[in-house]
Amino acid sequence: MQGHDRVELHGPNVDLRLSIKDRKFINACGQVNLPDGEVFTGPVEDSVDGWVRFTFPAASEGTLVEGIELHFQDGKVVKASAEKNQAHLMEMLDFDAGSRYVGEFAIGTNYQIDRFSRNILLDEKIGGSFHIALGRGYPETGNHNESGIHWDLICDLRDDSEILLDHELVYKNGKFVS
């Protein structure tokens, strides 16, 4: 994926576009976390546009937020809702100047992890999913978003979903195709 520019995600729970131009991808393959299994980068900070409905709950400070839907424009969350714990979602989004921007874009590649467990170190690696983290980015990827939060939100891509890279299909229904 490195060396490309535009990423598009399409499916029943996502219609999102972002730029990865000049960004470095890191393959998390068992050298830091075990179990591991994700490839991630930091998107161009003002590039995220579209919407996503996260299919798994997101835990934060002991609160489980469910049914999160976010709408992005020019990299920033401009509209947000949650089916459960909406107030907490808004607190997280309003945490600081960087909390409405995406610091990480990642694809889960561990197909041995196939269901939600409520443990983010496992869940963010679910094979066939993608996640974004609102807030702090990883400078080693090229992202310099600063925030006091780094909140991972996960969306399943295993059914009727795809990822295009510079308009070319590279991922379909939870699996890479090329």
Image (tube, rainbow, N blue to C red):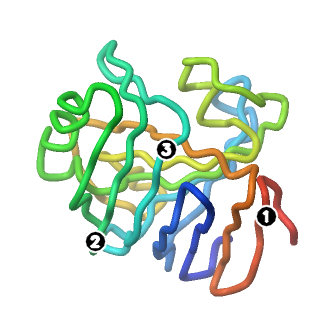
Q: Which mark is residue 54?
A: 3
Horizontal and vertical percent for residue 12? 60, 59
**Would you say the residues marked 3 and 1 are in contact, meaning their CB atoms lie under 8 Å apart?**
no
- From what the image shows, is residue 68 above or below residue 161? above
Residue named by callout 2: 73
Q: Residue type at mark 3: give it.
A: Phe
Task: Name the outermost residue toward the bottom.
Answer: 167
Badge 1 amino acid: Lys
Where does the N terminus fall, quadrant-wise? bottom right
Give the side of residue 151 with respect to residue 73, left or right. right
Viewer-proximal residue among 144 and 15 = 15
Q: Is residue 139 left or right of residue 74?
A: right
Within 10 angstroms of label 2, few (less than 14), some, or many (20 or more) residues?
A: some
Name the residue nearer the viewer: 20 or 17. 17
Image quadrant in which you'd find residue 145? bottom left
The quadrant of the picture occupied by the C terminus is bottom right
- Circle 1 SS class: strand
Q: Residue at x 49, y 44 (%)?
A: 54
3 vs 177: above or below: below
Q: Residue at x 41, y 30 (%)?
A: 66
Amino acid on which the number 2 mark rests in the picture? Gln
Q: Secondary structure at mark 2?
A: strand
At label 1, counting other C-alpha atoms closer than 10 Å, the crowd grade (few under 14, some 14-19, many 20 or more) is: many
Q: Is residue 111 above or below residue 122?
A: below
Secondary structure, mark 3, is loop
For residue 69, the mark is none
In the rendered structure, which disc, 3 or 2, sits on the residue that comes first in sequence? 3
Instruction: Give residue 23's position: percent from left, percent from top.
Output: 50, 70
Residue at numbered disc 1: 172
Is 55 left, or right, of 47 in this rendering?
A: right
Number of marks in picture: 3
Distance between the Cα atoms at labels 3 and 2? 17 Å
